[in-house]
Image (spheres, rainbow, N blue to C red):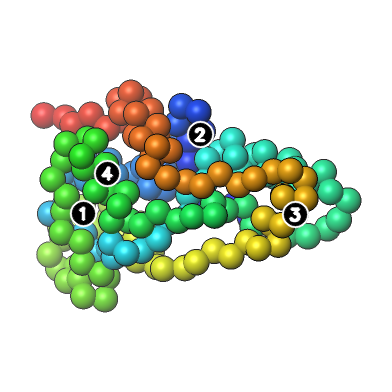
Amino acid sequence: RPSMITGDAINGKTTDFKLFYQPLRYFIKEIFSKVPANLDCKLNLINVDTAAKAIVTLAGRNEVATYHIVSPTAVSVGSLVELASKYFCFEMPSFIPVENFDFKDLTALQKKLIMPFVPYLNYNVELIATISFAKLLENNFRSVEFGEANLMKLFRYFYDSNFTKKTS
């Protein structure tokens, strides 16, 4: 069971701009002035190649079990969007936790765009994968921490893909 899978760790390449990419696109295009999101919310992101290597490593074991394929560190929504706003040169919207957000402030289109992402932008769950990490370590596999350098690769690929371009 993997956490949120992103582009690869080498160059950020992905075939699917969903999960955090889509709301990021909305922020880049400055579609929202207010967003129902908690800046302290933690997102557990893992690169596709890291997840694939972990799955192959664990699949080679002669046992039946469920493993959690996650990063040992999570990224806060606030730090991700702040870094993205500097990289993509957009003004950050106001982030208001969902319990305090007045959805009447959004247009019908804005609601339709943001609603699928509201849970991801507001829950604060810590993913514990102690057993998975131990089993991976037994096989000389160390989980890669997901940090700023990693995000920059994802942003670069996202930008180069033209998916982020503002339209006039």
The local crowd at label 2, few if under 14, some if 14 to 19, many if 20 or more residues have their Cα within 10 Å, is some
* Element class at badge 2: loop
Rendering coords of residue 109 (x, y %) = 21, 52
Which of the two labelled residues, at mark 2 and mark 4, occupies the earlier sequence position? 2
- Are the residues flagged by discs 2 and 4 in contact, CB closer than 8 Å? no
43 lies above or below 10: below
Which of the two labelled residues, at mark 2 and mark 1, occupies the earlier sequence position? 2
Which of the two labelled residues, at mark 3 and mark 1, occupies the earlier sequence position? 1
- Are the residues flagged by discs 3 and 1 in contact, CB closer than 8 Å? no
Using the numbered discs, state the Cα–Cα distance from disc 4 to disc 3 in whole angstroms. Answer: 33 Å
The local crowd at label 4, few if under 14, some if 14 to 19, many if 20 or more residues have their Cα within 10 Å, is some
Q: Residue at x 12, y 64 (%)?
A: 105
Q: Quadrant of the C terminus?
A: top left
* Element class at badge 3: helix
37 lies above or below 168: below
**Residue type highlighted by circle 2:** Ala
Using the numbered discs, state the Cα–Cα distance from disc 2 to disc 4 in whole angstroms. Answer: 18 Å
Q: Which residue is mark 1?
A: 110
Left or right side of 147 for 93? left
Q: Residue at x 47, y 46 (%)?
A: 146
